[in-house]
Amino acid sequence: MRRRAGIGGLQNAAAARDQYRLLGENVARLRTDLMKEQLSTFRSQLEDFARKHKNDIRKNPAFRSQFHEMCAKVGVDPLASNKGFWAELLGIGDFYYELGVQIVDVCLATRPHNGGLINLEELCKLLSQRRKGAREVVSEDDCLRAIGKLKVLGSGFEVITVGKRKLVRSVPTELKKDHNEILELSQAQGFVTGEEVERRLSWSTGRATDALETLLDEGLAMIDEGHRDGKRRYWFPCVSSVSSFVASETI
Amino acid sequence: MQKLGELKLPHFFNYPPYFTLQPVRETREKQIQLWKELILDYCRTQKIFVVGLEEDFALFSNPAIERSLNHEARVAFLSAIVSDGRAEWMDKGHRRCLILWHRIQDWADIILRFVKDNGLEDSVMTVEEIRSGIESRGTDIHGMDRTVLMRALKLLENKGKLAIFKGTSTDDEGVKFSV
């Protein structure tokens, strides 16, 4: 643009700036609009996909899990509300709600045996047994999602990781670090002795005894004094696959 | 799953801590519940009426996991069954326990049904015939404990459903049904 001197030149410069600004805004709006359009297109494509593959989503846990991931990427939460498009289309809102209720039941049923801590694998196994007639197979991913929903409802359910395993906690008892370490140690054989805890974790007798006794009181451990070596063993039902027998008799 | 006789053993039977009486109340209550049910089920399927605490009773130990119930645990579990009215101590020392996997009243009902099913309403039988005759085969009455049978019969006698009388020989008592 030709530079002009004087007032006219200033006015031109101001007008040019305005025009650039407008252009800038337009570009920005255009970009947003484009993005919105892309997102909207993607969303409707996702909806089409969901409609077409409704049965697969219902029946196949692995597929279902991938579908959830896809949704998450686009900012869609099929579980956000029980009503609404997604819940109606897939009916999966009910699926997770129902699953959540069953999880609560299983945890309550096994609580006298394992103190309110159950390993995720065991939970899924019990749920599958319970749901033998149902069309939909339940995966660990499904359980985690259902528990996630339970958490949101403030039910006190939580998934914690101990060593290689995921444990589902259904009681308010918070596990302290010392307890966690003992649980992890117990995963090898399903039990520990006081001596073993002291030796492997380098703790004093007092510290080991305190932690073990607390776990016992909380119902997370059971004692065994029947071994011929005479040493007291502390067994942890939540790390063995023994929880199942108790519940299968009551479920 | 392991079996003992006809009974499928529940998994807790293979979990060592269940053979130690648990100190924590809630855990112990669950433990007692499980053992009560197992003992009753086992006695029913094996038709065991008397359990001697110091004798060999299959459920008291599990060689597969090298665990046995100590005396205190045995007393605890059987006492729980007694409290439920499904067993009675036979001696003051609590060494022998009569297991009523059917209560006496239930046995009485079973006998009544047995009488009706076999058209024995007005007949006479010896006590021994009742528990080992052909008619009793296939029912719980077959081979049942004689003491328990007598108690059930006495209960029915009190209700006027039958009369017990001494037989001609010293061998056996007889029963005349009037159902």
Image (cartoon, coloured by chain):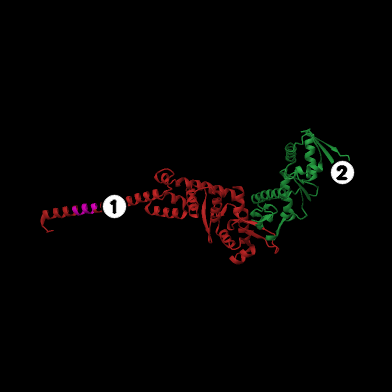
Residue A21 appears at what percent x and percent y?
21, 53
The residue pinned by badge 2 equals: B171
Q: Which residue is mark 1?
A: A32
Predominant SS along the magenta part: helix
Colour of chain B as rendered: green
Q: Residue at x 78, y 37 (%)?
A: B155
Could you say which chain is coloured red in the image? A
Mark 2 nearby-residue class (10 Å; few <14, some 14–19, many ≥20): few
Task: Give the total of numbered labels.
Answer: 2
Q: Which amino acid does the dot numbered 1 rest on?
A: Thr
B47 in the magenta segment? no
Position of the N terminus of chain A, as image quadrant, is bottom left
Using the rendered image, report if marks 1 and 2 lie on a common chain: no
For the residues marked 1 and 2, what is the alpha-carbon distance in whole angstroms? 105 Å
What is the chain identity of the residue bearing mark 1?
A
What residue is at 74 percent from the left and 53 percent from the top?
B72
Residue visible at 39% across and 54% down? A70
The chain letter under disc 2 is B
Q: Is residue B68 above or below residue B121?
A: below
What amino acid is labelled 2 in the image? Asp
Give me the disc on residue B159: none
**What stretch of residues is rendered in magenta?**
A19-26
Q: Position of residue A205 (x, y in %)?
A: 63, 63
Residue B107, given in percent of the width and then of the height, sits at 74, 41
Q: Position of residue A157 (x, y in %)?
A: 52, 50
* Residue A218 in view here: no
Mark 1 or mark 2, whichever is nearer to me:
2
Q: Is residue A194 above or below residue B171?
A: below
Kind of element beneath mark 1: helix
Task: State the image quarter where residue B64 is shown.
Answer: bottom right
